[in-house]
Image: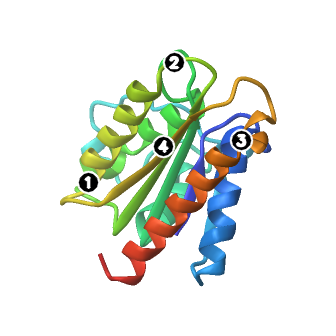
C-alpha cells in the first residue's frame, strides 16, 4: 500500500492521521510506503497538447518515481489538508501529473482507496469529491473507497481528538479488510 500525503507540513495533522492508519495497517501485516509530497520535487503539469504522443513526461522531477509506486500499489491512501475549499497545492500537482498516465491508458491497480481530509473550517465535501474524481479518472473499474474527515484548527490539534484518531484506525481496518479479502 502507498500513502500519499499532500500536506506541506510533514508532521502536521494530516500526516498524523496517516501515521495512525499506517501503524494500524502494520499491526495487520500490511506494509505501507509513505510519500510526503512536500519532501519531493513535483512540478505542476505543463499541459502539453501532445502528451499522449510523448514517450515520457519532460519534467526532470520525482513525479515518475512517485507515480510508479502509486500505480503499482495494491492499496492507496490519499491525504490532504483542505486549502481554500479544496486539496492542497501539493496534492493538486500530484493529481494533475497523472494526466500522462491517463493519456496512455494506464490505470491504478489499487484494490481499495482511503481518503483523508482535514480542515480548520469548511471544504470537506468539496475536497473529498476532488479526491474521488481523481480515483474515478485513474481507475478502469469500481474501487472501494473509505474516508476520514475531520476538523483540526491548529497544528497538533488532531492529536488531541480521540474520535479523529479512532476514525483513522477504522480507516486502516476497513482498508486492511478489503485488501485481505481480495477486494
Which label sits in the foreground, 4 or 3? 3
Q: Position of residue 41 (x, y in %)?
A: 67, 42
Res 23 quadrant in image: bottom right
Write the residue at 55% across / 49% down. Answer: 63
Residue sitting at the far left: 141
Q: Position of residue 52 (x, y in %)?
A: 25, 45
Q: CA distance from mark 4 to mark 1?
A: 15 Å
Marked residue nearer the N-terminal end (3 or 1): 1
Residue 58 numbered mark, or none = 4
Which label sits in the foreground, 3 or 1? 3
Mark 4 Cα-neighbour bin, 10 Å: few <14, some 14–19, many ≥20:
few
Q: Which residue is mark 2?
A: 122
Q: CA distance from mark 2 to mark 1?
A: 36 Å
Q: Which residue is mark 3?
A: 161
Q: CA distance from mark 4 to mark 2?
A: 36 Å
**Residue 92 in sight in this render:** yes
Q: CA distance from mark 3 to mark 1?
A: 43 Å
Q: Which residue is mark 1?
A: 104
Amino acid at each position: 500500500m502507498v500513502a500519499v500525503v499532500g500536506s506541506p507540513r510533514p508532521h502536521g495533522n494530516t500526516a498524523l492521521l496517516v501515521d495512525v492508519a499506517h501503524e494500524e495497517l502494520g499491526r495487520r501485516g500490511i506494509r505501507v510506503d509513505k510519500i510526503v509530497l512536500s519532501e519531493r520535487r513535483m512540478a505542476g503539469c505543463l499541459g502539453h497538447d501532445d502528451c499522449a504522443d510523448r514517450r515520457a513526461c519532460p519534467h526532470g522531477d520525482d513525479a515518475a518515481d512517485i507515480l510508479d509506486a502509486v500505480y503499482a500499489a495494491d492499496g492507496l491512501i490519499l491525504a490532504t489538508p483542505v486549502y481554500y475549499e479544496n486539496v492542497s497545492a501539493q496534492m493538486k500537482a500530484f493529481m494533475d501529473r497523472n494526466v500522462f498516465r491517463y493519456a496512455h491508458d494506464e490505470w491504478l491497480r489499487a484494490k481499495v482507496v482511503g481518503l483523508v481530509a482535514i480542515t480548520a473550517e469548511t471544504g470537506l465535501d468539496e475536497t473529498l469529491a476532488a479526491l474521488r474524481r481523481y480515483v474515478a479518472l485513474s481507475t478502469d473499474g469500481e474501487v472501494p473507497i473509505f474516508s476520514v474527515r475531520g476538523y483540526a484548527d491548529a497544528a497538533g490539534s488532531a492529536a488531541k481528538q480521540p474520535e479523529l484518531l479512532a476514525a483513522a484506525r477504522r480507516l486502516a481496518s476497513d482498508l486492511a479488510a478489503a485488501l485481505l479479502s481480495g477486494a
